[in-house]
Amino acid sequence: MLRVPNPDSIIKNPNNLIRIGIFGRPHGVRGETRLWLDNPESDTLFPGIILHTKRGEFEVKTVRYTAKFAIITIPSIDSREASQSLTNLEISVDRDMFPELEDDETFYQVDLIGLTVSDRDEKVIGTILTFLDGLETDVAEVKTAKGKLLVPLIASVVIEMNPEVGLVIEPLSTWVAEEE
């Protein structure tokens, strides 16, 4: 699943672009560039994919992965200085370039952004802003009338989650501590 770290990182627009990460610092002196993926396990990067940035489009020539980031080459970036000029640029790809999902039961988390969160009694709690990764478990950040709520995506809280229904959870009183 594609995960994104915060609502500001999501680029959804008429061009169908979805943020996947940011350019990091140069890697070496021949123009290789580190790329920090929002989902390090993503297989969205491959030779030939077009990366969209505020500075234009870049075609990926080669990709290799380390434990923490990807290292890519771009034909038009052939020096450390050229690579340095990309540092901290947000990268998006066309949603249509995401890998094909294996079955109808599978979806990308980004497909749930903006959908309704309700409890088993159909009481609306809010809308999904984003998903947080890198914690012990995945967490949905939900915008509510009172602010934000972090919903752990675990079996004891989540009843159902998919693009058709959004996120259905157990009533808050069963898993959220009362404020005193």
Image (tube, rainbow, N blue to C red):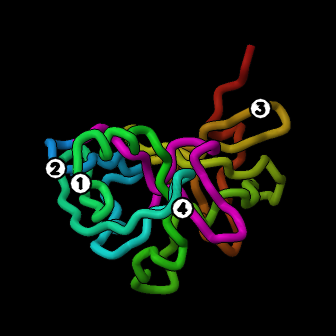
Q: Nearer the viewer, mark 2 or mark 4?
A: 2
Say what amino acid the circle numbered 4 marks. Answer: Gln
Seen at 37% across and 68% down, the residue is: 59
Q: Nearer the viewer, mark 3 or mark 1?
A: 1
Residue 9 percent across, percent down from the top left: 57, 46
Q: Which span is picked out in magenta?
A: 1-26
Q: Nearer the viewer, mark 2 or mark 3?
A: 2
Residue 78 percent across, percent down from the top left: 23, 54
Determine which residue is flagged by label 2.
30
Cα separation between marks 4 and 3: 21 Å
Cα separation between marks 2 and 1: 5 Å
Q: Nearer the viewer, mark 4 or mark 1?
A: 1
In the image, taking residue 111 as reference, residue 49 lies left or right, namely left
In the foreground, 137 or 45? 45
Q: Earlier in the sequence, mark 2 or mark 4?
A: 2
Cα separation between marks 4 and 1: 35 Å
In the image, taking residue 24 as reference, residue 10 lies left or right, namely right
Specify the label residue 147 is tagged with. Answer: 3
Say what amino acid the circle numbered 2 marks. Answer: Arg
Seen at 41% across and 63% down, the residue is: 58
Q: Earlier in the sequence, mark 4 or mark 1?
A: 1
Q: Earlier in the sequence, mark 4 or mark 3?
A: 4
User: Where the N terminus falls, by quadrant?
Assistant: bottom left
Mark 1 crowdedness (10 Å alpha carbons): few <14, some 14-19, many ≥20: some
Specify the label residue 109 is tagged with. Answer: 4
Seen at 68% across and 51% down, the residue is: 128
Mark 2 touches mark 1? (CB < 8 Å)? yes
Residue 39 lies in the magenta-colored region: no
Instruction: Look at the numbered disc 3 and give the secondary structure of its residue.
Output: strand
Mark 4 crowdedness (10 Å alpha carbons): few <14, some 14-19, many ≥20: some
Determine which residue is flagged by label 1.
78
Residue 47 percent across, percent down from the top left: 28, 73
